[in-house]
Image: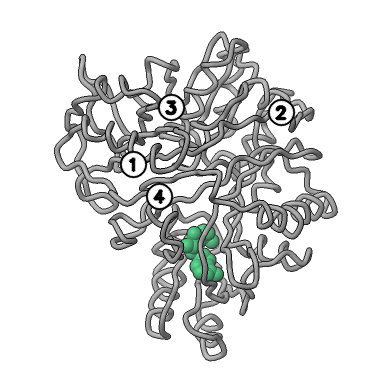
Amino acid sequence: MKVLVIGGGGREHALVWKLCQSPLVEKIWCAPGNGGFAGEADCVAADVANPVGLVALAERLGADLTVVGPELPLVNGVVDEFTKKKLAIVGPNKIAAQLEGSKIFTKEFLQRHSIPTAAMYGAFDSPGDAYAALCAVDWPVVLKADGLCAGKGVFLALEPDLATDFIERVMEKNELGEGGKRVMLEEALEGDELSFILLTDGERYATFVPTRDHKRALDNNLGLNTGGMGAYSSDELLPEELRKTIIETIVEPTLKGLTKDGIHYQGFLYVGLMLTKTGPKVLEFNCRLGDPETQAIVARMDFDLAEVLADAAAGNLKPEKLKWKRGASACVVLASGGYPGKFENGYEIQGLTEAEKLPDVKVLHAGTKREGSSVVTNGGRVLGVTAAAENLPAALQKAYAAIDKIHFDGMHYRTDIGRHAQQRKAAGD
Ligand code: AMP
């Protein structure tokens, strides 16, 4: 099997890492990939926003299977273009990808199918109406730009001035571009968050091990929001009873709702949950795998990912093939100095070989590039140091021991990944 992975971050490196382990895979490309894992996949230039260009690339390479990492190509309709040409691809089509591409579409979908979620106060096309609606909400309130906004479209406002400011920036000054043309107001939920990801072929589904990510830049959930500073997965993260509730009240109604609405959904479905006192509620859907959740998930896979993804793309998923290593895994992100604000690239990374010599550790490259015989930083999130073990403390110990071997100027990372697994109070992380 010749496989093309679309995307170029840590999530895609994790996919490449696992796909390469399959005896079925004879060739693997990553478009555009990144220099740090060019030894594991052939990195080829690509504009991931352009579905037609990606089809041409897959045809030129002769890929038997394409796996899509980021949301942008999916929301732009890459799967529809591949399907027209009868090329195998894992991911939802353009209409189905609206579950990530439009918060308002998703909220209406959830309401239509009575799936637990935060109550919506309203969805607005005009800033005037949005300002007016603030008179009738409970505080704090959550404001969401409707479209894709690179993780900047959600804001929890503690008071009216802050909500007004968000509406002005997003709807009047267009700071988030097209994605901010419509804004939704919803109830703020409290609880622990959980990432619950599944793979479906449109009929059958298989759930992945649950994960929890850490969005804030600094320890104790301080600092700015980031793309994700780390994630972990463990057997204890999701008690069986709660898992059953999530399946019965959220996963199955969602898949049935899609079918009822005439939407064929094939690919990964990321369900972002808030575990509230009154039960799990949907915060968001993503139409792809999370980053860095994927790194933690892949570390626990005990099955042939290439075989399973080919089955899913062919509409023939066999959920019983997905087997998981018991225990836990963790991914700790090493970021550039200044990230998520301004940062500089080009710092040499030392210690990669020593770190990877440690058992059960894999260093996944998110933003790196090769310069001669060196690997240098080339992004905000640079590396995801990932480890698996028999339990979470051991997985964390291995990941942090590997980090001790790695150095680049300005490197920063959280030292408390997974800590709130033991302190169940750290909600909203
Ligand atoms: P979303 O993209 O909708 O998941 O929002 C991003 C993040 O904002 C989530 O991971 C939560 O941390 C937070 N969030 C979103 N919706 C709510 C809500 N209704 N109540 C509290 N926090 C929320």
Mark toward the viewer: 4 or 3: 4
**Of marks 4 and 3, which one's residue comes earlier in the chain?**
3
- The disc label shown at residue 418, or none: 4
Instruction: Examine the rendered structure and indicate whether residue 242 appears above or below residue 356.
Output: below
**Of marks 3 and 1, which one's residue comes earlier in the chain?**
3
**Of marks 4 and 2, which one's residue comes earlier in the chain?**
2
Asked whether, in this view, residue 376 is left or right of residue 133, the answer is left
Which amino acid, by three-letter code, is at mark 1? Val
Q: Are marks 2 and 3 in contact (CB under 8 Å)?
A: no
**Residue pointed to by mark 1:** 333
**Of marks 2 and 1, which one's residue comes earlier in the chain?**
2
Which amino acid, by three-letter code, is at mark 3? Pro
Give the CA separation, mark 3 to mark 1: 21 Å
Give the CA separation, mark 4 to mark 3: 31 Å
**Residue pointed to by mark 2:** 313
Give the SS element for disc 3: strand
Q: Position of residue 119 (x, y in %)?
A: 64, 75
Give the SS element for disc 1: strand
Which amino acid, by three-letter code, is at mark 2? Ala
Name the quadrant of the N terminus: top right
Mark toward the viewer: 2 or 3: 2
Instruction: Examine the rendered structure and indicate whether residue 105 appears above or below residue 298.
Output: below
- Please name whichever residue, 277 or 397, is drawn nearer the observer in this view of the structure: 397
Q: Ligand 1 closer than 8 Å to the CB at disc 2?
A: no
Disc 4 crowd rating (10 Å Cα; few below 14, some 14-19, many 20+) is many
- The disc label shown at residue 32, or none: 3
Q: Residue at x 67, y 20 (%)?
A: 307
Q: Are marks 2 and 1 in contact (CB under 8 Å)?
A: no
